[in-house]
Amino acid sequence: MTQTMTSIERVETVLRGGIPDRVPIDLHNFMMTAQASGALFPEFFLDGEAMAEGQIKAWREFGHDVLLLENGTAALAQACGCGVEYFDESAPVSFTPAIKGLDDLDSLRMPDPTKDGSLPELLKATRIVASEIGDKAYVMGRADQGPFSLAAMILGMDVFLYELGVGKRLDAIGRLLEFSLEASYRYCVAQMDQGARMTSIGESLAGPDVCSPKIYKAYEWPYAQRLVARLKEKGIPLSYHICGNATRIAGEMADTGAAVLELDYKCDLPKIKEATRGKSTILGVIDPSGVLALGAPELVVDKVREELDILAPGGGLILGPGCALPPTTPPANVHALIETAHRYGRYRADGSLEAAD
């Protein structure tokens, strides 16, 4: 099958469970765009026009199908009142909780994505990219952190996890998660209002590298499922990101109804393929650091081919890094990923991969 589809057609075909002309490609490259801009990272990540320009410039160089727009993991937390530190060579991080404890829940104020923190600049970036190239590339405006991770930042991760473990104030934890669910939902909708075709949340704090599957199922899954259901009522598809080895919960993640699961290189590829088959599209899962940032192009080729062989047959894959690319990722390695996917990721009509030329 020759490459006959546009990027948007290619991605939407996969999301429908169909077979595209080739595997679509995503780049989780917001830190690379900051590095390439030459600007100071704190200034870049607070400037919607700069972030948009960086994404468009990268798309013109690499020609990837999916543009994932964000500035890290702390924007929504900052809008909720958390203290955030902006670093010179990395993404901003939330360090200071918004409240001192669960007795302070009444002091929380629901953020307005159009006014609070850096959210307006992030929405501006999505709006500009969607306006300028949204008819050519599939634009995903990330809505930052989902309910579980946002709640952990608002209360402080150590306190939040302690309260879950002790289990004596679960009513208050429930109130905090309800607040975080509503904040996530509003930002998701705001991203879509800018012209994005999909939105996304990150919930890595709920993954098995941090929490047990039991905690995930009790305190993350119900809120993720409700967020997916509310967004579906508006016709909004959601991409659901968890870093680390999420193999044990991949089936549950798919059962939320999320259109896409953003999974990491630590996952067992055959197992996540089976767990998500017919339910969700996998986005990932190439190692962003050990392979794409630090490896040689030959290693990139090997890892892309390995992933394609396991995850691509029958569809259900958007190829890309399993998490954010480090800022110093060599462009040559990104080109190697793109070129390998173009060569070895082409489909026959029956969903098998064509032999490379």
Image (spheres, rainbow, N blue to C red):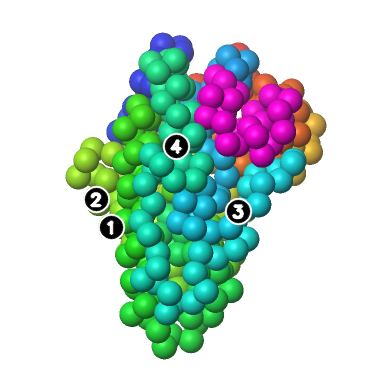
User: Given this view, does label 4 or label 1 mark the residue nearer the observer?
Assistant: 4
Image height check: is 252 above or below 131? Answer: below
Q: Nearer the viewer, residue 69 or 63?
A: 69
Residue designated by label 3: 84
Q: Residue 129's x, y, as percent?
A: 46, 22
Residue designated by label 4: 120
User: Residues in magenta?
Assistant: 27-56
Q: Residue at x 19, y 45 (%)?
A: 233
Kindly indicate whether the residue at mark 2 contacts the one at mark 1 (C-beta within 8 angstroms).
yes
Image height check: is 263 above or below 68? Answer: below
**Does the stretch in magenta take in 88?**
no
Residue designated by label 1: 226
User: Given this view, does label 2 or label 3 mark the residue nearer the observer?
Assistant: 3
Residue 236, quarter of the rendered image: top left
Question: In screen coordinates, is 3 left or right of 286?
Answer: left
User: Given this view, does label 1 or label 3 mark the residue nearer the observer?
Assistant: 3
Circle 2 sits in a helix, a strand or a loop, which is it? helix
Circle 1 sits in a helix, a strand or a loop, which is it? helix
Distance, label 4 to label 1, CA atoms, is 25 Å
Q: Is residue 85 visible?
A: yes
User: Given this view, does label 2 or label 4 mark the residue nearer the observer?
Assistant: 4
Going from the N terminus, do you reach mark 2 or mark 3 first?
3
